[in-house]
Amino acid sequence: MSRLIDELRKLPGIGTKSAQRLAFHILRSSDADARALADAILVLREKLRLCSICNNITDVDPCGYCSSAVRDQHIVCVVEEPTNIATIEKTRSYNGVYHVLHGTLSPIGGVGPEQLRIANLLTRLTPAAMPDLDSILAPAPDDNRTIREIILATSPTTEGEATAAYLAVEIRRIVPTLRVTRIATGVPAGSDIEYADEVTMTRAMEGRRDF
């Protein structure tokens, strides 16, 4: 029991008391439920991996987004975590591909560029930055390797903004002409402007568009 509690405490957001409750719940569960839980964890570890292109969680490599023939491979949306992809997909307004960083820059937390999945994002820009001789002599009309826009969709937190700023500098260092955009932030839909704080209202004004 102590061993199980110690292992459960390693999960994010799980303290000692929560780990104890989970451990006793598992103890009271049927053998079938306990085996199903253990089997689900083992299958997760055995079958799932990170996509070698975008770092999304997948059971095939490359993932369904990167290998899709109907998605726009020229636009890459950079997100912090794999769970962010589901949020964007719910909008049904984005048809490009993704790149998952698995975190944000946090000097206080000891998270620097080396701890994030940034290197292979910059590698994805290489074909556009340094085309080979064949592509120069006979360029393809629609080269799927050429990225035309990077959308920085990190959260509007201090860490998210710092990460977006760092990526923008690094991307433009490799491909100065590449379009780099940032998701808009401001007053949420359905809310009252009266209750918007100063920062939110400032961003809403700065991100205004033609109507």
Image: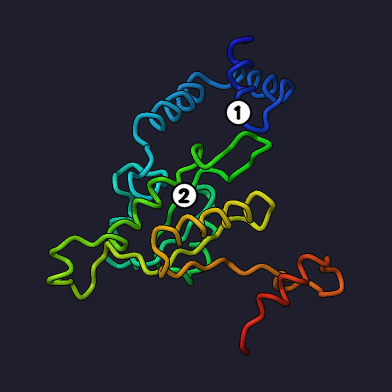
Q: Nearer the viewer, mark 2 or mark 1?
A: 2
Tag 1 secondary structure: loop
| 21 relative to 201 in the view: left or right | left
Q: Is residue 105 above or below residue 201?
A: above
Colour basis: rainbow
Q: Residues within 10 Å of mark 1 (few under 14, many from 20)?
A: few
Q: Which residue is mark 1?
A: 11
Q: Nearer the viewer, residue 107 or 197?
A: 107
Classify residue 174 by image quadrant: bottom left
Which residue appears at 29% of the width and 48% of the height? Answer: 62
Which amino acid is tagged 1?
Leu
Picture coordinates of residue 40 (x, y %)?
44, 30
* Label 2 CA crowd tier, 10 Å (few <14, some 14–19, many 20+): many
Question: In what quadrant of the picture does the C terminus appear?
Answer: bottom right
Q: Position of residue 210 (x, y in %)?
A: 61, 88
Most extreme residue toward the bottom is 211
Q: Secondary structure at mark 2?
A: strand
Residue drawn at x 39%, y 52% as measured from the top left: 122
Residue 59 in the image: state x and y as whole percent: 33, 41
In the drawing, what numbered circle is on residue 199? none
The residue that mark 2 highlights is: 100
Residue at the extreme top: 2
